[in-house]
Image (cartoon, rainbow, N blue to C red):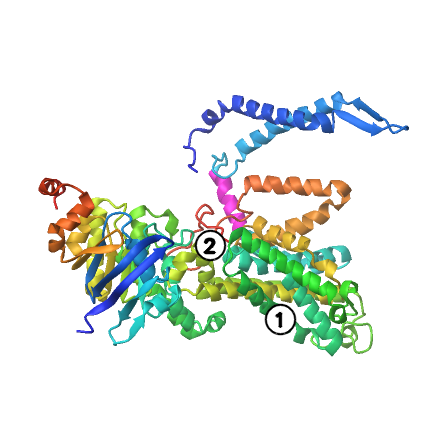
Amino acid sequence: MTAPAPKPAPASRAPDVAFIFKKALISALVALVLFSLMIGIRTEAGPAGQLIYWTRFGDLAAVVAAVFGGSIVMELLRQWWGPVGTIRIVPPSVQSALAVARRAIAPVLLIFTFLVPVIFYDQRYILDLGILVLTYVMLGWGLNVVVGLAGLLDLGYVAFYAVGAYSYALLATNFGLSFWVCLPLAGILAAFWGVLLGFPVLRLRGDYLAIVTLAFGEIIRLVIINWQSLTGGPNGVSGIPRPSFFGIPLTPGDDGLAAKLGIEFSPTHRIVFLFYLILALALLTNWVTIRLRRLPIGRAWEALREDEVACRALGINTTTTKLTAFATGAMFGGFAGAFFATRQGFISPESFTFQESALVLAIVVLGGMGSQLGVALAALTMIGGFELFRGLAQYRMLVFGVAMVLLMIWRPRGLIGHRAPTVFLKHSQAISSDLVKEGHG
Amino acid sequence: MSGKNILTIDHLSMRFGGIVAVNDLSFDAERRKITALIGPNGAGKTTVFNCITGFYKPTSGAMRVRHDDGREIQLERLNDFRISKLAKIARTFQNIRLFPGMTALENLMVAQHNALMRASGLTFLGLIGAPSWRTAEQRAIDLARLWLDRIGLLDRADDAAGNLPYGDQRRLEIARAMCTEPALLCLDEPAAGLNARESAGLSELLLSIRAEQGTSILLIEHDMSVVMEISDHVVVMDYGVKIAEGSPEDIRDDPKVIAAYLGVEDNEVAAVERELGL
């Protein structure tokens, strides 16, 4: 796509009036055809079973007019804010201020996250929501290794989440192992399953890879449902031990943490502890991913996303590179799963449906593939925003859908669409998303 | 005698279904020399390259690499990535295959993957930031800087490879191949799309690579000015078979080669030759 030649803003917009009207007219026509039957005519079964229908041309006209007007507004908005490639009418001073804000956003967000349990100590709802958001941040960061860095589309990520959750649940309930022993085990087991999934899909690309990983996610869920003797089937596993503060339980009894510290017991202590636990796990994921990107393995992942043939010509073993990406992503999924199990105290296969995979993938894509900050922002928007609109009841999904469509118009490559180089000689400059490949699967 | 040739191709054949792309081809590439593989479009040159670098498994025939230390490696038994690793053969592509979303420097760092992987203790030493890893990484950056300097791209080291002009991308791909520290460098039409000045610069770069690194070069090229200027030995292919072999001067006058390229009557050859400056 060639970028339009830069012209003075008024000149470029003046001849567009006819174009905007034409576009709005076409949208209105399509709406008229669509809604003439859906809204224009109302049918019902009469008392004797006969067909009763009446027309609602007034409503139809209102809807078509709304589409016409909305189309004009949308087009104007596009002209002013502009999607990628159009001229922006933002003064340079505002742009530089935005650049400063952009650099400050990550530290500010991190400090705020640390303070959440202090600020909202009394609000259990916010703390629970914070834990939920952080869980998805961690899952997003884990999947980001596979999808964002290595460019392998994985639709079955929830399988590793499930493996981690069931590993902890079963090891803890059957053998009485503590959370801190089970956490690495859950990660290792999930990584193992990641490698197992990796082997058959090594030769697949794109759509085929997506479908096989989707199937893998379903297989794990179906095995969990049907292997009743081990997993309890649809009844799930209950009575999963709560995490302890390195051996000291968070209970009201004499040997609890509150009694040992000499403070009054409160159930909020456990929530705050869980909040900092998932925050630590998420930050560990982030730290490891950032480190890995600067190591040869991380560069090989990104090179694999850019051009697999060139990788092979340079002597990179693409098999092990893909497998390590799957294993690393799966390991973080497994950690998150173990945390999920200890937080809930009860897990069942219902928590690990395809919906979860899709949600995590949406977070990664929305955030900007490969961008750590983008994924965190996207998780906050998706999970937090979803809760924010709870008051809208059945219109919640509608608002959500519209928000997604708008975001994809303005930021087709995600919230943070550029790539930061892993190494530089003089100065690090962000690479535009037009150049960065999305991977071949 | 046995140490003279770095690459020996023995009765190589490659069939795709009913099509015989390469038919019973044999030639040698001498150590520290530039061997050019030329021929009209569709002669099977790139197929030969893909066989040598392991992207295709040949239908029959043998390909041997003999290193300075006397090690001999049968290429047809190796996977593509092992050919770069063990046989020390690096290649470039006819249509440039850089990593466009990575910087020029990062491209050269990826090329040193195997050495860096060892230095980073299969990632684990690197993850904890061991000092041995840090020095290895700095060495890798220095090597990349050296090559960026040699291809004149030091100023653009931090630019995305996809943003570089075409000629720079060609040179960067050669530098990337050289960062794997190969014994044999296979270049698939390195001068394609370059202007006369850039072609001359390319010839200089290749001669300096041969002189300073001692790397043997195998070259597919259509730009005869480059081939005639730098090649020590020329192999001409047409329809999958070798039709001539020899020094650039011999090839220039070979009637079979002229016929393959120009397809003209013998009495017109001299006129056409003069016109093309051959």
Q: In this view, does B237 lie above or below B112?
A: above
- Could you tell me which residue is drawn at 49 percent across and 26 percent down? A13
Q: Name the residue under label 1.
A: A189
Is residue B63 in the magenta section?
no
Viewer can see residue B109 = yes
Whole-percent x, y for residue B185 in the image? 27, 62
Is residue A94 in the magenta section?
yes
On-image quarter of the N terminus of chain B: bottom left
Q: Is the magenta stretch mostly helix, strand or loop?
A: helix
Residue furthest to the front in view is B18
Query: Callout 2: 10 Å neighbours few (<14), some, many (20+)?
Result: some
- Could you tell me which residue is drawn at 29 percent across and 49 percent down? B42
Whole-percent x, y for residue B7 in the image? 25, 66
Query: Callout 1: 10 Å neighbours few (<14), some, many (20+)?
Result: many
Chain part drawn in magenta: A92-103
User: In the image, which disc is placed on residue A420?
Assistant: 2
